[in-house]
Every structure is written in C-alpha cells, then in structure tokens.
Amino acid sequence: MGYRSSASTWKTALVLGAASVSAGAYRGYCDAAGIPIERESLELALTWGPTIVFGTAGGLAGLVAGMLGGAIGGAAVGGSKRTIRGVVAGTTLGATAGTAIGGGVGASAGGIGTLVGYLVGYSAGYIAR
C-alpha cells in the first residue's frame, strides 16, 4: 500500500511539474514571438496558475503533516493531566506551521518551474522570430 501511495505522489508531482514548465514555456514563447494573448484570464492562468496549484497542494500536505505531528508532540509533552490541552495546542501550532511552510515551499516550486519554462519558451520564440 505504501509503495502505491508513493508512486502515485511521484506521478502527480511529475504531471504538475510538467504542466508548470509547459505553461511557462507557452507564455514565454508568446512574449518573444510577439503573439498577443487576447484573453486576460488565460494570461493570468499561465502566469500564476502553477504557483497557486503547487502552493495549495503543499499547504494541504503541510496541514495534514503538521496536525498529526503537532498532536503527537502535544500529547507527549502535555503530561497525564494536560494531555487534551497539549494535543489541541500541538495540533493548532502544527497545522499553522505546516500549512505556512508547505504552502511556501509548494508555491516556490511552482514558480521556479514556470520561470524555467518561461526562459526556455522565450528563447525558442526569440530564435523562431
């Protein structure tokens, strides 16, 4: 079961990464070749879409990991009389930190993929012009 989950996660990351690079490449090619993108929503989606998707996925993964880690840590530190308070405090802190860190790392990965694609697409569009 763990192997399938890991393989599925890897495939999802690969598809999202390819989509991020492709969106950036198309946007860069259009900019270099002088092809206007007439729909503002398409331009917005190509520029910011991968960053938003990666940030959301990273934030959700960080939320779950932070909640579980915080609950376990809070239960261990809380002691016998304060176990419930420790779990609640640990879960809250872990969820907040996990979401912030996971979302930040995910958004950065999406932005970097888009930037790399943009540079490749811009270079191809510049050469084709």
Image (cartoon, rainbow, N blue to C red):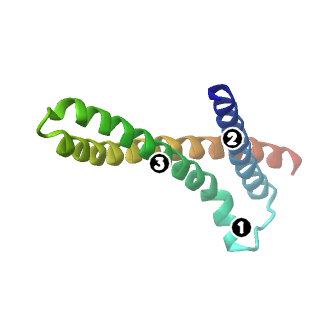
Query: Where in the figure is residue 127, as x and y percent of width and height?
Result: 84, 44
Kind of residue at disc 1: Leu
Q: Earlier in the sequence, mark 2 or mark 1?
A: 2
* Res 46 quadrant in image: bottom right
Read off the residue under disc 3: 59
Secondary structure at badge 3 equals helix
Read off the residue under disc 1: 42
State yes or no: discs 3 and 2 in contact (Cβ < 8 Å).
no
Secondary structure at badge 2 equals helix
Read off the residue under disc 2: 12
- For image coordinates 52% across by 50% down, the residue present is 55
Q: Residues within 10 Å of mark 3 (few under 14, many from 20)?
A: many
* Res 10 quadrant in image: top right
The Cα–Cα distance between marks 2 and 1, rounded to whole angstroms, is: 23 Å
- Which of 114/123 is in front? 114
- For image coordinates 31% across by 33% down, the residue present is 72
The Cα–Cα distance between marks 1 and 3, rounded to whole angstroms, is: 24 Å
Query: Where in the figure is residue 37, as x and y percent of width and height?
Result: 76, 68
With respect to residue 107, does 83 lie above or below? above
Please indicate whether residue 107 sits to the left or right of residue 129 in the image.
left
Q: Quadrant of the N terminus?
A: top right
Q: Residues within 10 Å of mark 1 (few under 14, many from 20)?
A: few
Kind of residue at disc 3: Gly
Q: Is residue 104 visible?
A: no
Please indicate whether residue 121 sits to the left or right of residue 43 in the image.
right
Q: Residues within 10 Å of mark 2 (few under 14, many from 20)?
A: few
Q: Is residue 64 visible?
A: yes
